[in-house]
Image: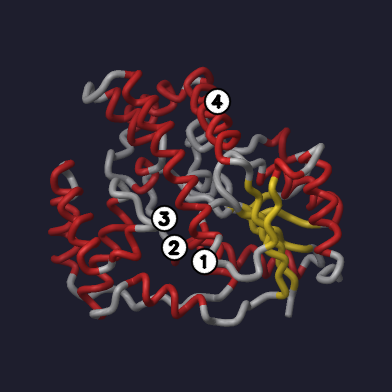
Amino acid sequence: MKPLVIVGGPTATGKSAAAIALAKKIDGEVISADSVQIYRGLDIGSAKITEEEMQGVPHHLIDALEPEEPFNITVFQRMAKEAIDAIHESGRIPILCGGTGFYIQSVLYDIVFSEEETDLSYRAELEKKAESEEGRRELYEELRRIDPDSCEAIHENNSKRVIRALTFFKETGTPISRHNAEQRLRKPAYDCCFFVLTDERAALYRRIDARVDKMFEQGLVEEVRALMQRGVPRNATSMQGLGYKETWAYLAGECSLEEAVYEIKRDTRHFAKRQITWFKREPDAIWLDRGSFADPESGILEAMLAETERIKK
């Protein structure tokens, strides 16, 4: 099988820097597994890596779509596999980097997704209900009733994924969590080193809070305002990302700036917990705890280099 390195883990654990450092050592290229960095113009709120930070390492699936364009798991899987094939053809090693476990697993296990749904009126009905906070809560409770396991991985405010899970159940009669679990029993499609970066909970939360504060200092409000003025609709996939939907609510006069900041920090911490839960399902993951190294950057790099020796060409 062809080689693939994965650098996953919760937000704010230094995944991008680790992937770049590794890529420079093993002649690799980085593929982003992030649902927001894919969009042009969504830079601050996504903590998008800069060209300077890339240090000359080629990156894929960054700034690949306009913010009005839809993006979902099947689109990601197709684009990521195309990038992996191109990197292999160039004789280099692909490094898939990000915190969205489902995206990563869709590539690693070449997950087969269901055909397009046939009852589009049902989806439209759910999307209409999701426009209100009360409606989103009702949809989430319905999902909890039919597929409680999905609620462990999907946040109540992530209406896109809630709706997808509900429509999948209506179309197939099978909870999407069961389908995903069955797909995860598939054998990996690549000779893979799967690293998960993590840290002590309190340290992780401190970095999350500091990152959110930095986003607002860098101009997150102005970034979202520019997207609104451009005409990007509020229900666009790009605007569902953490930081963007809360800042939009502030600019729409629905909450104060302090409330928006608080919600972003709180929801990002909750998101990090769900990310950790998701990666714990990966049986062959190599966990690298930042707190276990005197110098986390060099220590993590040395550990990754030792493990990747077996898959290097």
- Pointer 1: what residue? 77
Amino acid identity at mark 3 = Phe
Q: Are marks 2 and 1 in contact (CB under 8 Å)?
A: yes
Q: Are marks 1 and 4 in contact (CB under 8 Å)?
A: no
Q: Marks 2 and 4, how far apart in space? A: 30 Å
SS class of the residue under badge 1?
helix
SS class of the residue under badge 4?
helix
Amino acid identity at mark 2 = Ile
* Direction from residue 116 to residue 36 in the image, left or right: right
Q: Position of residue 283 (x, y in %)?
A: 61, 70
Q: Is residue 154 above or below residue 226?
A: below
Instruction: Name the residue: 51% across, 69% down.
Output: 106
Question: Closer to the camera, 124 or 201?
Answer: 201
- Pointer 2: what residue? 73
Q: Are marks 2 and 4 in contact (CB under 8 Å)?
A: no
- Pointer 3: what residue? 71
Question: Closer to the camera, 113 or 14?
Answer: 14
Q: Give the mark nearest the N terminus, 1 or 4.
A: 1
Q: Marks 1 and 3, how far apart in space? A: 10 Å
Q: Are marks 4 and 3 in contact (CB under 8 Å)?
A: no
Amino acid identity at mark 1 = Gln
Task: Select label 2 or label 4 by which is in front.
Answer: 4
Amino acid identity at mark 4 = Ala
Checking the image for residue 210, the label placed there is 4
SS class of the residue under badge 3?
loop
Task: Select label 1 or label 4 by which is in front.
Answer: 4
